[in-house]
């Protein structure tokens, strides 16, 4: 074997073993979720189930169904609102430079790096004052604003690719800021909206801390909080825990498998 | 249709001044070309007329209307100025069909659907693109895109056309056709047109008048012939014409009672008005310029000629550019025939009578 | 004139409230939190009584703060270089014109798609001392002397957490480095090949020196993440065993919502914020403010 060939083999060997490592916990989770409690004890965590059963998946779904719906509501409301404002702000920041616009944009970007810990206590107080503490509504309101900086950033980056002459042409043709947005920018925004929306969907769906702090009771909590509770209350019921994990992981896994390239474009710019 | 008057315009970007108190009178219905090297402020000036930029000082009048006067707080937004613009990259919206693109300015003005349809078809016929109306811009060639951009500008029946290097993205052959086409359209429609380019050949072939710009100022405004034959200064003389004018430093001297410009290797008699003009401003140091086509090549020694050597001969179609070296300086002559000329050959050069330009070296001003 | 004014009004009506509430949410709350850290708010009833730097003095005398800080720095010191190195390695491997690059990239990125709660649940199973995947695997491979209590061992728990977090973020790090690698013109690499440089030399001398941007970007992102990390550790260990996996975010949460020491929690949060800003603002300022001419 030549040196070049042996190097190729080494490259593939490394790639495959890393792929194995990446998939190992997922595989272990999936096979365990398909086993009965007895089989979990009797078999290893990596062997496929001898007698596959959907019982753990069904039981976990029953436990998580209300929180799953809650998370869907959060994802829907948060994504739509923050994408809408993000798109408009991104358009203004990329196409209408005004005095201090760079500074303002810098302030928006810094928001991405502000740790949520500093907002926890004030937000708790605001939510109790308006009577939303513990309720799903608190999270709905929160996620609407929470995603705007990220969306603004994504849209601004992507709108930079639209030639400025489009805006100028529309201006000379008599279109104002709003008409230009509606008639020129928005129709060219399909990909930016897909990218920003997918990012928001995964971020909101996966978030845990805010749900933990702001919601109380199954009727209000997002699915991540419910899964953590499930983990805490069914200690040792690994098949049930894994089944719950699968339900929570499934939507974002599907997004990453099929629409991963958009997610990558979104994250690559940051 | 309207004239455009620009008075003492100043545009600053931070500390740099892009336009330095510029004034220009553009006549009704004329085709004026703004030409100059990159960074001379020509696009800035065009954008200021369009209203895409705000200037710091001065006035811009479009017809009878004051469009810009920062000192009086006047700024008419672009869409109210009755100007239409064609951009270098055409700015054709990729998500609309050709029809949609041309109709866009009218739709914004909420013109009736039927009327839009009628006018788009009319304009498309004028530009011979009626077959393309249903297509998306992606499927268009560069030349077709350019026509669409023109159509979108024309449909508004603007008072003034502004064109920012509209041929920059076309290949050489299409560019020649596009020049003819735009000139024809402009003449037919009679719309005042301001055309920006960095290409002096384009400027010379298209402009009724040309404004040569340099570092935020206008060096000279005039017809192509005026600029070519009577450049007002060294910059214009050097910028207009291809190959460029040959230039030599010279000194004013009195030789045997005659007033001469001494080039060191050659002396030319100064015409009386030139001498007077030089004397009036105390100019001793001159620049002498001769266009390539005004250099005559003789194979034999001549009176009033100087010796040179042929370095290279470049055929350019029906004429030839002959590159020569004389006394360590290179120069170029354009001639109709090179029969009997060879590389390395010694020749004698003379200047065409009355075709020599004289400039004051320190100010660059033409002396005549 | 009128339509234009109306358009501006529409945009203003949409933008101004959005921007204002966003800035209030991020900056107003940060300021509010800072204010709270100077009060004596404890228990259910909010208090705005100012007590100066008392909370900060308590903080600096609190052994739990120093434990949390130490654990947090350990996490940063292990996780940040770890995830960057794995990402760089995977990116270089993927850059070798491999077949199935897209599939590999997708697989590496899969862990990044998961919620920390899911990751924590999966890794609780991996690390379970009795019948978890890792110990069983070691058993099967005849390496049973390596078996251990993992997350139940106070000396190992931070390393276990770091390994799981590297697992989760390696794909993201790969994507950042791969984008950096792809932005280097191929002609440069070809030129180096023509000059006879070995693959190793090409990467060391030509490629990696040009990866400054991805290095800085990933450093900032992962650093900030490690500073505010909470979800994963909270679900996996609750900061245990004992205090061995308490980091700032975990302690802040426990002090605030467990013990209802709100002012004291705000003090922790302010410290986290200050350290984050110290890292991020110079970098962001350089990137975004220099565009201003």
Image (spheres, rainbow, N blue to C red):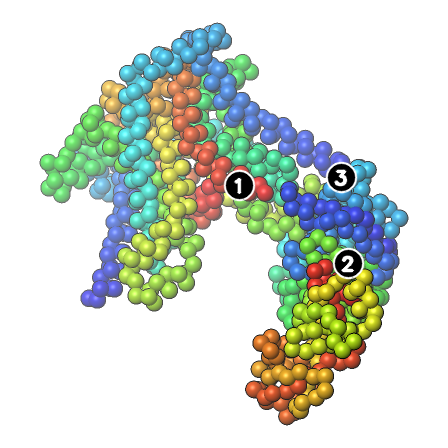
Distance, label 1 to label 3, CA atoms, is 32 Å
Q: Which residue is drawn at 65% across and 72% down?
A: B172
Q: Are callouts 3 and 2 both on one chain?
A: no
Q: What mark, if any, has residue A260 been given in the picture?
A: none
Q: How many labels does the image show?
A: 3
Q: Looking at the picture, how far across and down is residue B91, in whole percent?
A: 66, 55
Q: Looking at the picture, how far across and down is residue B366, in whole percent?
A: 76, 65
The answer to whether marks 1 and 3 mark residues whose Cβ atoms lie closer than 8 Å is: no
Q: Name the residue under label 3.
A: C4
Q: In this view, does A166 lie to the left or right of A23?
A: right
Q: Which chain carries label 3?
A: C
- Nearer the observer, disc 1 or disc 3? 1
Q: Are callouts 1 and 3 both on one chain?
A: yes
User: Residue pushed farthest right?
Assistant: B64
Q: Is mark 3 on a helix, strand or loop?
A: helix
Q: Quadrant of residue B273?
A: bottom right
Q: Name the residue under label 1.
A: C290
Q: Looking at the picture, how far across and down is residue A85, in whole percent?
A: 59, 35
Query: Which one is in front, A174 or A48?
Result: A174
Please determine whether, in this image, residue B6 is positioned above or below residue C76: below
Distance, label 3 to label 2, CA atoms, is 26 Å
Q: In which quarter of the image is residue B332?
A: bottom right
Q: What element carries label 2?
A: strand
Q: Name the residue under label 2.
A: B194
Q: Which chain carries label 1?
A: C
Q: Looking at the picture, how far across and down is residue B221, in whole percent?
A: 79, 61
Q: Residue at x 60, y 84 (%)?
A: B310
């Amino acid at each position: 074997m030549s040196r070049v060939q042996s190097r190729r083999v080494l490259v593939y060997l490394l790639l495959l073993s890393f792929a194995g490592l990446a998939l190992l916990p997922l595989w272990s989770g999936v096979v365990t979720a398909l086993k009965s409690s007895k089989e979990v004890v009797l078999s290893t965590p990596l062997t496929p189930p001898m007698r596959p059963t959907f019982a753990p998946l069904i039981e976990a779904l029953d436990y998580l169904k209300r929180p799953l719906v809650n998370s869907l509501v959060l994802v829907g409301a948060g994504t739509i609102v923050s994408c809408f404002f993000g798109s408009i702000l991104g358009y203004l920041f990329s196409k209408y430079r005004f005095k201090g616009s760079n500074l303002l944009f810098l302030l928006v970007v810094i928001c991405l790096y502000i740790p949520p810990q500093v907002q926890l206590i004030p937000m708790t107080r605001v939510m109790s004052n308006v009577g939303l503490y513990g309720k799903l509504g608190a999270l709905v309101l929160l996620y609407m604003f929470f995603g705007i900086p990220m969306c603004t950033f994504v849209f601004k980056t992507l709108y930079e690719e639209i030639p400025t002459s489009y805006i100028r042409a529309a201006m000379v043709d008599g279109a104002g800021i709003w008409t230009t947005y509606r008639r020129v920018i928005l129709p060219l925004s399909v990909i930016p909206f897909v990218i920003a929306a997918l990012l928001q969907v995964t971020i909101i769906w996966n978030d845990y801390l805010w749900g933990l702090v702001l919601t109380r009771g199954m009727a209000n909590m997002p699915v991540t909080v419910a899964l953590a509770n499930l983990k805490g209350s069914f200690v040792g019921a690994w098949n049930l825990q894994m089944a719950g994990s699968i339900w929570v992981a499934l939507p974002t896994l599907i997004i990453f498998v099929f629409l991963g390239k958009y997610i990558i474009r979104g994250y690559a710019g940051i | 249709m309207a004239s455009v008057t620009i008075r003492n315009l100043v545009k600053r970007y931070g500390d740099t001044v892009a336009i330095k108190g510029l004034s220009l009178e553009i006549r009704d219905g004329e085709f004026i070309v703004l030409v100059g090297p990159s960074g001379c402020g020509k696009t800035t000036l065009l954008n200021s007329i369009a209203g895409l930029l705000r200037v710091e000082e001065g006035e811009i009048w479009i017809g009878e209307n004051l469009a810009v006067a920062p000192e009086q707080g006047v700024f008419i937004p672009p869409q109210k100025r009755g100007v239409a613009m064609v951009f270098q990259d055409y700015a054709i919206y990729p998500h609309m069909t050709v029809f949609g693109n041309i109709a866009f300015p009218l739709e914004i003005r909420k013109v009736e659907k039927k009327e839009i349809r009628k006018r788009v078809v009319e304009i498309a016929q004028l530009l011979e693109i009626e077959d393309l109306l249903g297509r998306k811009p992606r499927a268009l060639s560069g030349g077709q895109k350019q026509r669409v951009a023109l159509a979108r500008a024309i449909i508004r029946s603007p008072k003034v056309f502004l064109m920012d290097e509209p041929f920059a993205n076309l290949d050489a052959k299409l560019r020649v056709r596009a020049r003819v086409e735009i000139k024809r359209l402009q003449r037919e429609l009679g719309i005042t047109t301001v055309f920006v380019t960095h290409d002096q050949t384009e400027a010379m072939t298209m402009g009724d008048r040309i404004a040569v710009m340099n570092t935020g100022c206008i060096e000279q405004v005039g017809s192509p012939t005026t600029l070519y034959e009577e450049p007002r200064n060294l910059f214009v003389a050097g910028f207009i014409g291809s190959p460029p004018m040959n230039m030599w430093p010279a000194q004013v001297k009195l030789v045997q009672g005659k007033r001469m410009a001494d080039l060191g290797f050659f002396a030319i008699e100064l015409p009386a008005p030139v001498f007077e003009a030089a004397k009036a401003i105390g100019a001793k140091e001159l620049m002498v310029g001769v266009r390539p086509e005004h250099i005559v090549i003789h194979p034999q020694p001549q009176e009033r000629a100087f010796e040179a050597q042929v370095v290279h001969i470049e055929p350019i179609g029906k004429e030839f550019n002959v590159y020569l070296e004389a006394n360590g300086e290179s120069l170029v002559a354009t001639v109709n025939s090179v029969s009997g000329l060879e590389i390395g050959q010694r020749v004698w050069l003379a200047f065409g009578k009355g075709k020599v330009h004289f400039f004051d070296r320190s100010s660059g001003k033409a002396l005549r | 004139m009128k339509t234009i004014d109306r358009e501006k009004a529409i945009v203003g009506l949409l933008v101004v409230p959005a921007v204002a509430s966003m800035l209030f949410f991020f900056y107003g709350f940060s300021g509010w939190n800072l204010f709270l850290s100077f009060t004596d708010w404890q228990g259910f009833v909010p208090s705005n009584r100012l007590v100066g730097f008392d909370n900060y003095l308590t903080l600096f005398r609190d052994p739990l703060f120093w434990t949390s800080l130490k654990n947090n720095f350990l996490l940063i010191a292990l996780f940040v270089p770890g995830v960057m190195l794995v990402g760089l390695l995977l990116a270089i491997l993927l850059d070798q014109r491999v077949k199935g690059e897209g599939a590999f990239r997708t697989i590496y990125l899969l862990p990044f798609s998961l919620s920390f709660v899911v990751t924590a649940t999966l890794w609780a199973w991996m690390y379970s001392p009795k019948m978890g995947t890792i110990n069983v695997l070691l058993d099967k491979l005849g390496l049973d002397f390596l078996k251990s209590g993992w997350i139940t061992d106070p000396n190992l728990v931070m390393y276990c957490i770091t390994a799981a977090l590297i697992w989760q973020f390696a794909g993201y790090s790969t994507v950042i480095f791969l984008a950096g690698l792809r932005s280097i013109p191929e002609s440069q690499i070809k030129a180096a090949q023509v000059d006879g440089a070995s693959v190793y030399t090409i990467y060391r001398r030509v490629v990696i020196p040009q990866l400054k941007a991805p290095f800085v970007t990933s450093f900032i992102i992962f650093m900030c993440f490690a500073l505010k990390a909470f979800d994963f550790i909270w679900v996996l260990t609750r900061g245990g065993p004992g205090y061995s996996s308490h980091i700032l975010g975990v302690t802040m949460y426990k002090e605030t919502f467990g013990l209802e020491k709100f002012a004291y929690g705000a003090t922790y949060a302010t410290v986290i914020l200050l350290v984050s800003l110290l890292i991020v603002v110079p970098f962001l300022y350089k990137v975004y403010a220099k565009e201003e001419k």
